[in-house]
Image (cartoon, rainbow, N blue to C red):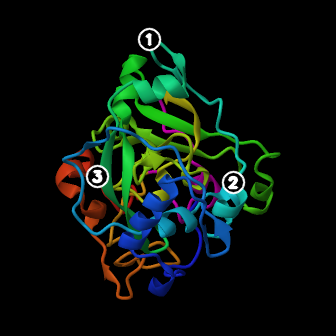
């Protein structure tokens, strides 16, 4: 999900936020609007979103950048490819199985996921290993809410995730150079942390296909590839599960992948980052600025060894 060059979008190419919201009002009136090379597709609104105390107050990255500059290798390795090739991705019906070391394993359909808890907006900083970052208003609720429904057993020390994969719907995946289906994992305490979001939307709308529809997770203190998209299976396991980028290149991608300015990727410095839409780089923050909330999870750990 995370290979490419930083700063590939110029600020002049990004729609200002006030223009974006004017456009949304226009679309809400039922009028189609073409912008740039493609027609915008109206997304289902998420009504009654609550506001989260976990949100940052930083300036939002424009909607157009969030939805057209993506890492989703099932739909191509180019940043612009997911928005083009995921248009016809079928996300209805959808189920997510939660299995493994659980007292009550079950399969959730999308309606039951949406009804499980109030959905709130959380504005998170997101940092990618390539050196670019965004500020995105996600919508969802803590992943722990879903996991508690199956009553994890004491043997469940890790949570393994698997994305949906269908070669007929995702033909570009064969050129991506990584194995599929995409898999990821978290330690149980990371998965149960209140910042870890089970995400169903962004910018007040249901997730666009290229952003991981219909359900994904968002882990804001880790590099972006940890926030797995289009989840089809969750398994509670005893041992550390394999993750796709570590399988593809273990020297460059570790299991934890916490944002850390002092631990460089072999091909990129992590000391600085470029916020999409800005020209100058800014300092990278340890744990992406969420250290007050999550640093206790890693007390006593060598963060260079467990990168």
**Where does label 2 land, which residue?**
87
Relative to 142, 2 lies left or right: right
User: Which residue sits at x=47%, y=72%?
Assistant: 265
- The residue that label 1 is drawn on is 103
**231 relative to 24 in the view: left or right:** right
Question: Vertically, is 106 above or below 49?
Answer: above
Residue shown at 50% from the left, 79% from the top: 6
Looking at the rendered structure, the secondary structure element under dot 1 is loop
Viewer-side label of 3, 1: 1
Nearer to the camera, 85 or 286? 85
Residue 104 shown left or right of residue 96 in the figure: left
Q: Which residue occupies 43% across, 51% down?
A: 202
Q: Is the stretch drawn in magenta largely helix, strand or loop?
A: loop
The quadrant in which residue 297 appears is top left
Q: Position of residue 210 (x, y in %)?
A: 60, 55
- Local crowd size for mark 1, using a 10 Å CA cut-off: few (<14), some (14–19), many (≥20): few
Disc 3 to disc 1, C-alpha distance: 31 Å
Category of crowding for the residue at label 2, using alpha-carbon neighbours closer than 10 angstroms: few (below 14), some (14–19), many (at least 20): few
What residue range appears in magenta?
A: 237-255
> Which of the labelled discs sits on residue 301, or is there none?
3
Quadrant where the C terminus sits is bottom left
């Amino acid at each position: 999900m995370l290979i490419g060059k930083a700063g590939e979008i110029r600020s002049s190419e990004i729609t200002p936020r006030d223009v974006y919201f004017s456009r949304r009002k226009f679309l809400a009136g039922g009028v189609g609007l073409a912008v740039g090379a493609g027609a915008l597709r109206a997304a289902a609104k998420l009504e009654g979103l609550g506001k989260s105390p976990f949100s940052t107050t930083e300036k939002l990255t424009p909607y157009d950048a969030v939805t057209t500059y993506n890492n989703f290798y099932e739909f191509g390795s180019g940043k612009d490819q997911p928005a083009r090739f995921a248009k016809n991705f079928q996300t209805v019906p959808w189920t997510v199985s939660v299995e493994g070391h659980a007292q009550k394993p079950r399969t959730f359909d999308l309606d039951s996921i949406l009804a499980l808890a109030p959905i709130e907006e959380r504005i998170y900083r997101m940092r990618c290993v390539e050196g670019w970052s965004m500020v995105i208003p996600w919508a969802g609720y803590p992943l722990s809410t879903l996991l508690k429904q199956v009553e994890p057993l004491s043997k469940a020390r890790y949570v393994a995730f698997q994305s949906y994969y269908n070669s007929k719907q995702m033909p570009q995946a064969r050129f991506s150079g990584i194995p599929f289906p995409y898999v990821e994992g978290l330690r149980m305490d990371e998965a149960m942390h209140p910042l870890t979001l089970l995400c169903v939307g962004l910018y007040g709308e249901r997730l666009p296909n290229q952003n991981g529809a219909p359900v994904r997770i968002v882990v804001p203190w880790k590099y972006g590839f940890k926030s797995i998209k289009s989840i089809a299976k969750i398994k509670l396991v005893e041992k550390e599960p394999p993750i796709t980028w570590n399988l593809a290149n273990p020297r460059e991608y570790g299991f934890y992948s916490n944002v850390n300015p002092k631990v460089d990727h072999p091909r990129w410095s992590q000391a600085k980052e470029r916020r999409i839409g800005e020209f100058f780089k800014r300092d990278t923050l340890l744990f992406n600025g969420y250290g007050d909330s999550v640093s206790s999870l890693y007390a006593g750990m060598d963060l260079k060894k467990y990168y």
